[in-house]
Image (spheres, helix red, strand yellow):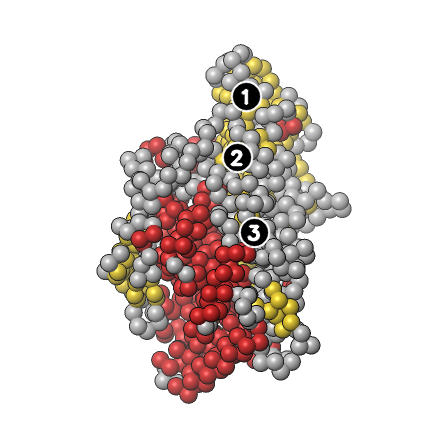
């Protein structure tokens, strides 16, 4: 992410290189020959804007070889997203639910995700030419993805974007002759689709694709029309200027002649629609106004970002505070976290429950909202867009989330197996909504025959139904219900049971306020008793980690961060000073890395089971560092935690925080930040995750020390001295009013 400098609005719009716009190399460490060398992170010295521009939020230029394991960036708009392939122009995983293009073809021996707009030079796929043709430089912006490559003396630059509120993916392709001599060559565009529609049904996994589309050459427009045979879906794809040269059923071929320094520009457009007439009409409009459409797209995103930090805006039902600081790390943490929220936002007309926020922003699970991930960034969502957050909670109330892990926004239905965290996650989202908005009338709203307050009470007490072995703990099931990749984290786990301690106390405070003192006292008593059992039965004395009780009464010790960060968040008051010291020591000696952290200690006996980096010793899920830092701030010296947090900020140089990052001892850092985990097996993690917004929560709650209470106002006790003593957080929303937080406290 570029750190903005003063007076650079025009330069930023042009994407010029700032002090922090340095080249980030891939795992192989090969720099593109025309790129600027890396520069050193020198800390705070530049004034930052309280409201960033799209260029301010851009990643740095990152160069990878084709052989590198990487997670390629995604473009997006309010209705969907598309993934850049490992090439300078290719596009894949286009999802505008219920429409999809270039998903996983449903055919025997499927190749997986299809690719479109791949380039051939003189009849040969571009990426296959000798080095440096196998290198592509990527730059992510909120409104587009820019890629660059150099092949046989030709420089290729593409800009991939998705116009606002349209089912269109567009790309500008510029070919410049840098060989120093006149060049004649052919450029071919290889177009595929697999277009499909799946309305009214959950998209449980990746984008669908039909493998037997009918393909029609539209000679008048010089484009291809792909038509699904098993659903109502059409993809119209073409390039302007138009060509009459059409080969192999799907390739558009151009004869190009360029003098030294001369360039040729092509405009690719892919429109998805239900029928041929609608798609072709949209295609004609897009090609006729391509440059204007691209400029309008950037301005739309500029306005959307501005709205996100402006009270009373028309785009969101709330707003985030503006951060004003001269400290680069602080600025990065906060605004990179915001980009994770932005990538998850959907306002599709096909949504079953209106505007919403999706969990993953890549090419898998393109329609799902998980209570777990949402809860981890629920404070920032409650500030930015409280109404969609409330709607998600109401949806989860009635979709039987004791059987499902997420809901699908196209069908409105619950999907997948049960996630053990759902009860406490739903309560956390409701808690954040109520604390920020003060909308306590919501508690009396009837949802499917039951008031919200009674639904919250039921979620807070559901753990008792899971105490099937009489151990006084909730049994949270098996691998698929918990961390998925830690084979010993099963059944009576500390972290999930700690969530019940939190949940009962939260609901008790609501009941007290409503005059139901008897039930409130009962819940508080049960919460205290449960906390005692967790400490007595599941803590490993002298170690700082926890164990899981099995149905037969045996235990597995598990050195995972989830118990640590959750217990510090949910039952801090129940820990002894000795436990706090031991838990701190466990983190700093077994989980900490300079730039990120490990989810599982490499000393854990289960370290050989699964290396998916969101929960293994290779790295950690995107919210674990921010959540862990929040907990450590409660038990460790502020300066010690801040030094680590500054290292976390460097991973924002790759765009939004990924679903997971990998510690620097396993994969070399990328431009000074922890490597964003690849999406390829065995890593299986996505380009972005909604809960990366938890870094916004970290800045607001831990560094600025904002305490949003339910009934006792908002308070602040900052830790700004470790970052920027003069930093300000403007327009902090709390129950109908906006506040400013400085080192002096609340204003």
Residue at 58 percent of width and 41 percent of height: 70
- Looking at this view, is 197 or 686 the one in front? 686
- Looking at this view, is 503 or 733 the one in front? 503
* Residue at the far bottom in the pictured view: 518
Residue at 61 percent of width and 25 percent of height: 131
Label 3 vs label 1, nearer the camera: 3
Residue 125 horizontal/vertical position (percent): 65, 28
Residue at the disc numbered 3: 619
Residue 254 horizontal/vertical position (percent): 59, 22
Residue at 48 percent of width and 79 percent of height: 527
Ranked by sequence position, the earlier of labels 2 and 3 is 2
Above or below: residue 222 compared with residue 401: above
Residue 616 horizontal/vertical position (percent): 60, 55
Disc number placed over residue 213 in the picture, else none: none
Label 3 SS: strand
Ranked by sequence position, the earlier of labels 1 and 2 is 2
Residue at the disc numbered 1: 154
Label 2 SS: strand
């Amino acid at each position: 992410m570029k750190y903005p400098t003063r007076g650079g609005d025009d330069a930023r719009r042009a994407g010029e290189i700032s002090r922090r716009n340095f080249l980030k190399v891939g795992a192989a460490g090969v720099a593109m020959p025309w790129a600027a060398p890396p520069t050193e992170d020198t800390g705070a010295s530049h004034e930052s804007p309280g409201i960033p521009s799209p260029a301010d939020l851009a990643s740095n230029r990152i160069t990878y070889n084709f052989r590198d394991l990487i997670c390629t960036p995604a473009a997006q708009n309010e209705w969907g997203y598309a993934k850049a392939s490992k090439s300078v122009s290719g596009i894949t995983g286009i999802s505008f639910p219920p429409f999809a293009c270039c998903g996983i073809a449903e055919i025997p021996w499927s190749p997986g995700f299809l690719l479109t707009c791949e380039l051939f030079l003189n009849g040969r796929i571009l990426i296959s030419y000798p080095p440096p043709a196998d290198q592509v430089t990527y730059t992510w912006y909120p409104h587009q993805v820019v890629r660059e490559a150099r092949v046989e003396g030709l420089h290729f630059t593409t800009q991939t974007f998705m116009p606002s509120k349209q089912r269109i993916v567009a790309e500008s392709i510029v070919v410049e002759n840098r060989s120093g001599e006149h060049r004649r060559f052919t450029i071919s565009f290889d177009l595929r689709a697999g277009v499909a529609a799946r309305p009214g049904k959950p998209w449980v996994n990746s984008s669908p694709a039909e493998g037997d589309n009918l393909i029609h050459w539209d000679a008048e427009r010089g484009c291809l029309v792909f038509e699904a045979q098993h659903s109502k879906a059409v993809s119209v794809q073409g390039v302007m200027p138009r060509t009459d040269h059409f080969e192999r059923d799907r390739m558009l071929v151009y004869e190009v002649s360029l003098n030294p320094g001369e360039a040729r520009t092509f405009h690719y457009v892919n429109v998805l629609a239900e029928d041929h007439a609608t798609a072709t009409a949209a295609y004609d409009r897009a090609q006729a106004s391509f440059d204007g459409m691209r400029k309008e797209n950037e301005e739309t995103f500029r306005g959307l970002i501005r709205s996100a930090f402006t009270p009373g805006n028309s785009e969101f039902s709330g707003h985030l505070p503006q951060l004003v600081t001269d400290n680069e790390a602080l600025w990065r943490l906060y605004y990179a976290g915001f980009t994770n929220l932005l990538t998850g936002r959907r306002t599709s007309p096909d949504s079953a429950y209106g505007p919403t926020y999706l969990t993953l922003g890549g090419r898998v699970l393109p329609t799902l909202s998980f209570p777990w991930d949402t809860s981890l960034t629920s404070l920032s969502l409650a500030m930015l867009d409280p109404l969609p957050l409330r709607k998600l909670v109401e949806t989860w109330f009635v979709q039987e989330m004791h059987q499902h892990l997420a809901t699908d926004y196209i069908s409105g239905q619950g999907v997948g197996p049960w996630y053990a965290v759902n009860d406490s996650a739903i309560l956390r989202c409701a808690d954040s909504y109520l604390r920020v908005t003060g909308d306590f009338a919501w508690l009396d709203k009837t949802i499917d025959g039951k008031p919200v307050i009674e639904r919250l009470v039921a979620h807070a007490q559901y753990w008792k139904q899971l105490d099937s072995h009489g151990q006084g703990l909730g049994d949270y099931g098996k691998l698929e219900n918990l961390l998925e990749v830690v084979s010993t984290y099963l059944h009576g786990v500390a972290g999930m049971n700690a969530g019940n301690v939190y949940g009962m106390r939260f609901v008790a405070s609501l009941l007290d306020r409503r005059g139901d003192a008897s039930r409130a006292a009962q819940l508080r008593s049960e919460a205290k008793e449960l906390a005692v059992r967790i400490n007595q039965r599941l803590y490993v004395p002298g170690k700082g980690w926890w164990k899981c009780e099995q149905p037969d009464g045996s235990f597995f010790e598990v050195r995972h961060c989830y118990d640590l960060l959750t217990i510090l968040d949910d039952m801090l008051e129940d820990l002894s000073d000795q436990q706090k010291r031991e838990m701190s020591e466990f983190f700093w000696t077994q989980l900490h890395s300079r730039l990120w952290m490990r989810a599982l200690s490499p000393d854990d006996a289960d370290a050989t089971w699964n290396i998916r980096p969101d929960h293994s010793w290779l790295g950690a899920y995107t919210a674990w560092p921010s959540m862990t830092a929040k907990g450590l701030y409660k038990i460790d010296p502020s300066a010690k935690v801040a030094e680590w947090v500054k290292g976390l900020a460097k991973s924002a140089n790759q765009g939004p925080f990924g679903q997971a990052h990998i510690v620097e001892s396993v994969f070399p850092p990328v431009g000074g930040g922890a490597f964003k985990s690849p999406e390829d097996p065995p890593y299986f993690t996505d380009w972005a995750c909604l809960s990366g917004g938890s870094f916004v929560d970290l800045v607001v709650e831990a560094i600025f020390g904002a305490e949003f209470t339910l009934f006792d106002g908002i308070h602040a006790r900052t830790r700004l001295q470790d970052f920027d003593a003069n930093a300000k957080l403007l327009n902090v929303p709390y129950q109908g009013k906006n506040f400013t937080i400085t080192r002096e406290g609340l204003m």
